Amino acid sequence: MKHGLWAVWVVVACGRAEPPTPPQSEPVLQEARSTPPAMQVVTLDAEPVPVSQADLAAQWPPIHRLKPSAQEVVTTALNLVPGPCEPCAQDHESLARCALRPPTEACKNVRRLIRRATRMAQRGDGIEAVREAVHYPDNWLLYTPDTGEMVGPPSAGVRVDLWRDASSLWSRVADTTVARLVDRYPGAVRVHIHDLKSPSGLAIGARTTPTWAVAGYRMRGAQSPDALGRLIEREIAHPPKELKP
């Protein structure tokens, strides 16, 4: 009987016993899938086609008369410089491409820039020197500030123009620079001093005092005699020479 009661108790006890709680399964981390960004399409401008040496020489006889090595210097330099006037600049053309267009009122300066490049290459200057010398797009640089006429060969040295506000401290510094230039290049420079608000200053849009022009090359702000002297010496070494295309 005892054994029967024990068996009943075991059965009852086992019936009441709750099964162990199964371990909770750990959540599975799911990698978030990001939506790929929309593809961006970038349109690149086509590389400009360089003007050939033959095409440039055919349009400009002075270039044709150069030695082949000098023709290469001119052609390369002009292809590296942006067109300085409309519509060349608007069409993102090089100076070389602009030089192939029929001459227009807006591009009067192209002819002189070609002459400058031809003259320098003829005398042995390299590509970088020629490129730098023709990379001046302002039309007014090629005209005398007072009359608006083309700047011709200097009759008495390199022309230096200075626009300044006489009341400015920087203008007094510029006067000292002028004195040093005259002393450094006696008889080789012709200095013309203008008021910043003079008709010529307004015509060229001079807003910085001082504003300089050395043989037509504009330089804004205070300049050292050395910086201006580099342009003066280049003009002395390579004086303008009429080369008609």
Image (cartoon, rainbow, N blue to C red):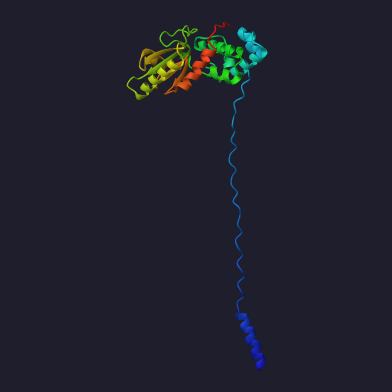
Residue 18, position in %: x, y? 60, 77
Q: Of all residues shown, which one is farthest toward the bottom?
A: 1
Q: Of all residues shown, which one is farthest toward the left?
A: 167
- Residue placed at 36% from the left, 21% from the top? 172
Q: Is residue 109 something that shows in the picture?
A: yes
Total numbered labels = 0
Query: Where the C terminus falls, by quadrant?
Result: top right
Q: Is residue 85 something that shows in the picture?
A: no
Q: Choose top left, top right, bottom left or bottom right for residue 40.
A: top right
- Residue placed at 66% from the left, 11% from the top? 67
Query: Where the N terminus falls, by quadrant?
Result: bottom right
Between 160 and 236, the one lying in front of the other is 236
Between 86 and 43, the one lying in front of the other is 86
Residue 11, position in %: x, y? 64, 84
Q: Choose top left, top right, bottom left or bottom right for residue 131.
A: top right
Between 194 and 93, the one lying in front of the other is 194
Between 59 and 141, the one lying in front of the other is 141
Residue 199, position in %: x, y? 37, 13
